[in-house]
RNA sequence: GCUGCUGUAGCUCAGGGGUAGAGCGCACCCUUGGUAAGGGUGAGGUCGAGAGUUCGAAUCUCUCCAGCAGCACCA
């Protein structure tokens, strides 16, 4: 007769179980419904298999599909295993490596057999079919503890070199577990090395709630110098309905794609001759100019002075700033020499002095700071620049407006004395808050990225820098849950910790835009100083900061956030005057002139087309206001206003009323 | 940069070893119509670039370029 153990349930009740009992036994004891619904267990706070026996007295919480986050994580991990099992069963000789749950699904990385290439999208349906078979077979998932050497031998025997390598490198003394799908020894059994936990059997998954979505390459252990594996992605859910909702969300996101909307709305284009650099069309640049004018007003109000600095600077300057050493592979370098006109010869000689297009504005701002002697009375100096920078981003990284090679930052550097630092960071927190709310972002998160493993500077400096940034956010009253306050260990830049602002958009995606970093390195390298109250020279601290990041990327985010329906003050065309009959042409001209006189961006549509056609076209073009005029309106001095996305079809009002209303609505948020 | 997929008219896309098709858009004509596509006629393409195979290549093969997805990168 074994010992009895006390199991405490979340409601405080205690049950006695015999040695060897499992959470599943407890669930069964409580009731058949729970036994069926229970997917896993939390034993003393640790997520575990429901079939793993207790090891002593314990607190137990049973996980069901109602515990959505845990249940999804478990299910996705299981889908990944089922995927691996399916692939090995269909394609013998495939090596398995690693396959975790992701944000909305799972993936698994494989090394396909040598006689074939990576898996293709055409093969996915077949693999899905095999996965369904495995799920329907309801194979038990059993945990087993192995000795390291035995496991390595087993992997070697099976030709699983990646798994063998992995097992070899697991820390000494760590318990190595494998999971069987099916019973050990079963001819249809399959095993993978895994920490777990897993569901009790494959049948706990819904064979209709997953979908393999794509294939891609991925490096073994994420390292570019390692073998390229073949990755299969899937999305996985607890039930069919969740999957359908997810697929719907993907469609919605695709409709918001700024590259598609940018083309449909005639905002900008990209072409191979200028990879990664944007051709802004009149309407797109209109958005830019409005946004830029707004940012200018906000930063001037906050005490910044705007500057403009050179695009090209001598390589020696970049060497001194440290960029040449740390950042050169991302810089566009040009020889400072008249190109040869000899078609046959090299365009430039080998010994020309080099110059580089600026990838950042900071060194130039320090150079402005260094002009003349600065006193402590001059500080803080807030210097801003709509700085156009070039960065040689890898081809594969380029993506519409979101990742470009030529970008314009809403950059700024604040030169402060040590005792001004916290206050300036706090003021920056307030500036970002104003700007994001003005631009229509209701929620954002502030995160503090802490020191990375590889870094410059002493631990004391890091302690100090991190504490200062943290203190500033606390003083601003924003180190709270409401502001998504979070600290991210290891995510800082190599020279400094940074605060990051992450916007949440209309469909829940997040975008990092703003940042502020305190930098004591660059002022040192470029020997910037000011004269203190004591008459001695002191080093200023330099705060690098951006609110919207870059205009290119931020406009891309705005387009996606608003699905193209920009707030009126940013809309490139704010109103179109459309005629019903040509007899109203003259009146339409009058209406247009009134709108323009009120500072509104309006266009006329006097084409010989039916009003249905005009309504459709301008609606698709996302014109926010359509002012329809026919004979009736011309006689009465009214307009029929049709608003994009409004419920009622139209509203007839006097021209005066309409102009006043639209003018008020089109006022930028900071001027209201 | 790496892996895979894709590249045909301004746009979206079909086709496919015997020198090109649709819809939308555009131009012109008819139509003056009250809130999401009125009708007719017409113009538009070295089928991404180069090389190869072939009697013949837009189609097959190779190389390059670009786009897309993912990976890596993102000071």
Image (cartoon, coloured by chain):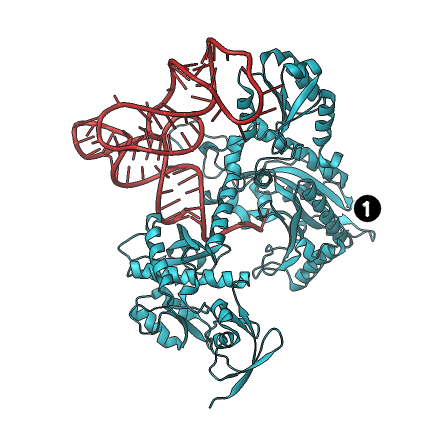
Chain colours: A cyan, B red
How far from the left and from the top, in percent, is residue A241?
48, 52
Rendered residue at 55%/63% (across/down) = A67
Q: Chain of mark 1?
A: A
Rendered residue at 58%/28% (across/down) = A283
Of residues A494 and A503, the one nearer the viewer is A503
- Look at the image and tell me whether residue A280 can be seen: no
Of residues A485 and A153, the one nearer the viewer is A485
Q: Seen in the image, is A185 located left or right of residue A325? A: left
Query: Does A109 sit above or below residue B4?
Result: below
Quarter occupied by the C terminus of chain A: top right
How far from the left and from the top, in percent, is residue A600?
68, 25
Per the image, the residue denoted by label 1 is: A377
Q: Seen in the image, is A522 located left or right of residue A430? A: left
How far from the left and from the top, in percent, is residue A518?
68, 52
Q: Secondary structure at mark 1?
A: helix
Of residues A163 and A517, the one nearer the viewer is A163
């Amino acid at each position: 007769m074994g010992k009895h153990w006390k199991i405490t349930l979340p409601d405080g009740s205690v049950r006695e179980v015999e040695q060897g009992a499992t959470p599943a036994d407890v669930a069964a004891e409580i009731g058949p419904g729970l036994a069926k619904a229970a997917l896993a267990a939390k034993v003393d706070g640790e997520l575990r298999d429901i079939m793993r026996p207790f090891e002593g007295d314990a607190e137990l919480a049973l996980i069901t599909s109602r515990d959505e986050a845990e249940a999804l994580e478990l299910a996705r991990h299981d889908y990944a295993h089922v995927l691996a099992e399916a692939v090995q069963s269909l394609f013998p000789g495939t090596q398995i490596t690693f396959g975790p749950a992701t944000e909305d699904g799972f993936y698994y990385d494989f090394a396909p057999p040598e006689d074939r290439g990576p898996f293709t999208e055409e093969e996915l349906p077949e693999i899905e079919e095999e996965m369904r078979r495995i799920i329907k077979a309801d194979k038990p998932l059993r945990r087993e503890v192995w000795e390291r050497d035995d496991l390595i031998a087993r992997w070697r025997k099976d030709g699983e070199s990646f798994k063998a390598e992995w097992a070899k490198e697991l820390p000494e003394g760590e318990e190595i577990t494998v999971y069987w799908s099916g019973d050990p020894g079963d001819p249809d059994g399959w095993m993978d090395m895994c920490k777990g936990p897993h569901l009790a059997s494959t049948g706990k998954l819904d064979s209709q709630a997953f979908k393999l979505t794509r294939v891609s390459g991925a490096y073994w252990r994420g390292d570019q110098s390692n073998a390229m594996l073949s990755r299969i992605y899937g999305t996985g859910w607890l039930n069919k309905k969740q999957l359908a909702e997810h697929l719907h969300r993907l469609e919605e996101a695709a409709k918001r794609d700024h590259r598609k909307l940018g083309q449909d709305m005639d905002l900008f284009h990209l072409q191979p001759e200028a990879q990664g650099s944007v051709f802004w069309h009149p309407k797109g640049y209109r958005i830019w100019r409005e946004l830029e004018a707004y940012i200018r007003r906000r930063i001037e109000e906050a005490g910044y002075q705007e500057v403009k600095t050179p695009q090209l600077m001598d390589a020696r300057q970049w060497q001194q700033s440290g960029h040449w050493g740390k950042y050169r592979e991302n810089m566009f370098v040009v020889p400072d020499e008249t190109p040869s006109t000899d078609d046959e010869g090299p365009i430039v000689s080998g010994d020309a002095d080099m110059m580089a297009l600026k990838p950042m504005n900071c060194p130039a701002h320090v150079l402005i700071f260094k002009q003349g002697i600065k006193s402590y009375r001059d500080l803080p100096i807030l210097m801003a620049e709509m700085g156009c920078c070039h960065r040689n981003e890898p081809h594969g990284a380029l993506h519409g407006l979101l990742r470009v090679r030529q970008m314009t930052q809403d950059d700024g550097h604040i030169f402060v004395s040590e005792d001004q630092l916290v206050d300036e960071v706090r003021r920056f927190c307030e500036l970002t808050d104003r700007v994001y709310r003005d631009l229509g972002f209701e929620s954002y998160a502030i995160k503090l990225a802490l020191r990375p493993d590889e870094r410059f500077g002493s631990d004391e400096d890091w302690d100090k820098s991190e504490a200062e940034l943290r203190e500033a956010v606390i003083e601003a009253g924003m180190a709270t849950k409401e502001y998504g306050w979070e600290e991210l260990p290891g995510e800082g830049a190599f020279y400094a910790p940074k605060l990051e602002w992450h916007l949440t958009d209309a469909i829940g995606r997040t975008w990092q835009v703003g940042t502020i970093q305190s930098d004591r390195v660059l002022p040192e390298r470029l020997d910037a100083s000011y004269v203190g109250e004591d008459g001695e020279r002191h080093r200023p601290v330099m705060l690098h900061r951006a609110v919207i990041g870059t205009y290119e990327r931020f406009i891309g985010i705005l387009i996606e956030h608003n699905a193209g329906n920009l707030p009126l003050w940013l809309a490139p065309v704010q109103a179109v005057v459309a005629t019903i009959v040509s007899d109203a042409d003259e009146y339409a001209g009058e209406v247009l002139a009134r709108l323009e006189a009120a500072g509104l961006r309006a266009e006329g549509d006097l084409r010989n087309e039916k009003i249905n056609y005009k309504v459709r076209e301008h609606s698709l073009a996302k014109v926010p206001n359509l002012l329809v005029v026919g004979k009736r309106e011309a006689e009465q001095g009214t307009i029929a206003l049709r608003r994009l996305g409004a419920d009622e079809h139209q509203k007839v009002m006097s021209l005066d009323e309409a102009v006043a209303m639209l003018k008020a609505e089109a006022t930028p948020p900071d001027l209201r």
